[in-house]
Amino acid sequence: MPMHFMTLRPLLSVTVLAALWATPALVRAQEISAAEEQRLEALARENAEVYRPKTTVTVGFRMLSSGANVHFGNLGVVPADVTVAPLSDGKVDRTYNNGYVLVDTPRATELDTNGVQTSIPGLGNRYQITATTDVTDANGNVTGTTTKLVSDNVSYTSGLTRFWGYSSPNQATSNGYIAMSAYSTTSDGQSLAKKQGASGGVELQFSQVLGRVSKRAEWGFTTGVALNDISSKTSGNVSATLHTLTDYYSLNGQPAPTTALDNPYQGGTYVDVVGTDGTTVIAPLGFETTTALSQLPNGALSANTSLVGGATVHGVYKLKGAYFMVKVGPSMRAQLTERLGINASVGVAGAYAGTRYSVSESIDIPDVGGTISTPATEQSSASKFLSGYYADFNVEWSANETTGLFGGLTAQKFGDYDQSVGGRIARVDLGSTVGVRGGVSIRF
């Protein structure tokens, strides 16, 4: 028994001492193994290719620094808003910008039951209209009749008219005529320009990876569509050639009736008159003061003149629409970190533009007052396809493997096209512009 006890004790002591001696070495070995494992994992990550889905779709906005530059040219076209019948048309109504001459016929009060004129024609001749009424006593019994004057009128005379008017005393000439004029203008080549400010739009884009350039860079192609507005409006005054058609109507020795710009003359005219019974007949029935005018103009005096720069045209010019852009080109993408990347694309583009051009122009009537305007707001529609180029540069941030955000710069260049309305030309130049873009990306 004692011998056995003495044999186990030294063995236990040796084992304990050996364990104590080996522990630090084991700890160091474990530490070296963990560090090496981390180093190898880091090296593997650095050398490993970064995986990203091959297809990306982006939806977002784009804001361009400028829109279309529109040059409004050949301005100042105001067609005549009245058509004056030629002398060869005979007795017809004629309307001018500063007056009118209408066809005259006997009034119903000048005709008998058979339609025969009862008034005596001739310059200065007149006819009266009277009315007979019963006279009653205090008991209501008819004791007689009385005749009252209803009106005193100018007689109808063939070749003259009582229905005419004019606007300005300047139209009365020194040789006994009234000048009636119609005006229009044609362009002297004047123009106005307007550049559109910032232009907002929306964009949809599709990108496909085709291959890798390095472990963190890949190449492919990008295509997309975008929609931006076209809006340009300007107003101003331009000079134009004034065309004046003037006819002269004889007063036949009579003085011109009084008129003013704020109170034009319009025949027939009447004033109050006191009847034979002392009763006042109130206009417009009383005493006719109409001045009869020749029904037809004097063809020998008619004139048609043109004066370059003789009119100032006031205009409002609008062009509104949009263009639909399609682009396609190669692209490059680089992954900077696990979440951050960049991409760039450059290529060809096409823009399908559709616009409506509206014009409203007017001129002041010379020496008369008032204005002549285009018959209505004139407008035309046009569409055009333009070729061009584009370039995009974007920064991408990935929220996860499938979704993220992007933002960047865009640039584009397109040509121009012309659109006309009523002889006026609008040159629409989409030109070169830059801007920013951003939105959401989806990868799959």
Image (cartoon, rainbow, N blue to C red):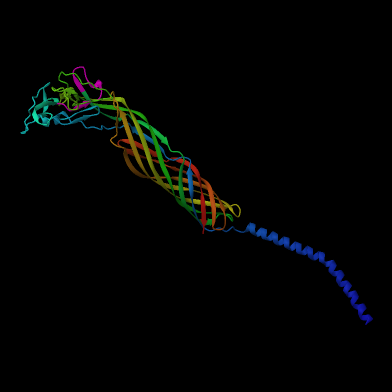
- Where is residue 111 shown, x and y percent of the image? 8, 31
Q: Is residue 156 visible?
A: no
Side (left or right) of 388 relative to 444: left
The boundaries of the magenta stretch are 161-178
Residue positioned 82% across, 66% down in the render: 23
Residue lying furthest front: 139
Is 373 one of the magenta-colored residues? no
Residue sitting nearer the eye, 249 or 211: 249
The part of the image, by quadrant, that contains residue 103 is top left
Query: Looking at the image, can residue 229 be seen?
Result: yes
* Relative vertical location of residue 358 with respect to residue 325 in this rendering, above or below: above
Q: Is residue 272 left or right of residue 37?
A: left
Residue lying at 93% horizontally and 78% vertically, measured from the top left: 6
Q: In which quadrant will I find the N terminus?
A: bottom right
Which residue is painted at 83% across and 67% down in the image? 22
Q: Position of residue 13 (x, y in %)?
A: 89, 72
Position of residue 262 in the picture relative to residue 46 (left or right): left
| Towards the viewer: 143 or 375 | 143
Q: Based on the displayed image, in which of its 4 quarters is residue 279 positioned?
A: top left
How many labels sit on residues? 0
Residue 73 at what x, y percent from top left? 35, 34
**Residue 390: x %, y % from top left:** 47, 46
Instruction: Relative to 412, say whether 301 is above or below.
Output: above
**Which residue is at the far top?**
174
Q: Residue placed farthest to the bottom in the image?
A: 1
